[in-house]
Image (spheres, rainbow, N blue to C red):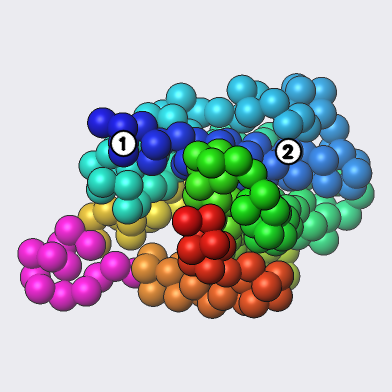
Amino acid sequence: MDDLIFTISVWTLPVLIAVTFHEAAHGFVARMRGDDTAWMLGRVTFNPLKHVDPFGTVLLPAMLLIGSGGRFMFGFAKPVPVDFSRLHNPRIDMIWVALAGPGINIVLALAAAILGHAVPALPGFMSEWALFNLVNAIQINVVLAVFNMLPLPPLDGGRVAVGILPAPLAYRLARIEPYGLFVLIGALFLLPMLGNQLGIDLDVLRWLVGGPSEYLIGWILEATGFDPLATLSVMR
């Protein structure tokens, strides 16, 4: 039970910070580009309660974390409302609004890696708890950024694709948005289950998200000079 409580405690804070900054960044850039919808609704804030979805941010991640023994977690926050028609240049500004979320997640991952150098200076148990929080923050923010850049509406990558594709293709892609969540659920849960039954690896999201995320995490650790294993050995 103590191990489970520790596992939950070192995932909760990184998740809340990652999704809060992600959604707030969308609203902030939207306001800068002409749409203050999110601002007027109080969504351009670092208060996680404004962005938490009871199921997507709390229940679903907890169920997956407990069910996988702390090996897997997935969740989502309440999307920040953006009225793209109010943006100064809707097609171009939509791209910047979409990129703001994944962009801030990469910044947070870099910040967590830099802060990792200060962990050995913390006393006792606090240093280990902080280290696990920071390592999880790097992983969560990178995976969140990469996942959201998949070119499928309503993900951020889908909105970027709609903004840069020629109008006929952009229109067709945009029409997928009402069904995008169902496609993601199928790719995340149903395809791997089917693959297990057939003896085939159908974990599409692991190919599309896992590989790029591992590469980006490696780049961040190298760029910042942060080695979690070396830091842990120093602490012990």
Height in image: 215 above or below 69? below
According to the image, label 2 marks what residue? Answer: 24
In the displayed structure, does residue 11 sit left or right of residue 48?
A: left
Which quadrant, please, contains the N terminus? top left
Tell me the element at label 1.
Answer: helix
**CB-based contact (under 8 Å), mark 2 and mark 1:** no
Q: Residue 4, which numbered label?
A: 1
Q: Position of residue 116 (x, y in %)?
A: 65, 56
Extent of the magenta region: 192-204
Q: Position of residue 94 (x, y in %)?
A: 76, 54
In the displayed structure, does residue 208 sit left or right of residue 146?
A: left
Instruction: State whether residue 190 appears in this view.
Output: yes
Residue plotted at (31% across, 32% down): 2
Q: Residues within 10 Å of mark 1 (few under 14, many from 20)?
A: few
From the viewer's side, name the closer residue of 45 and 236.
236
Going from N to C along the chain, the mark reached first, 2 or 1, is 1
Height in image: 171 above or below 126? below
Residue plotted at (50% across, 59% down): 232
Residue type indicated by callout 2? Ala
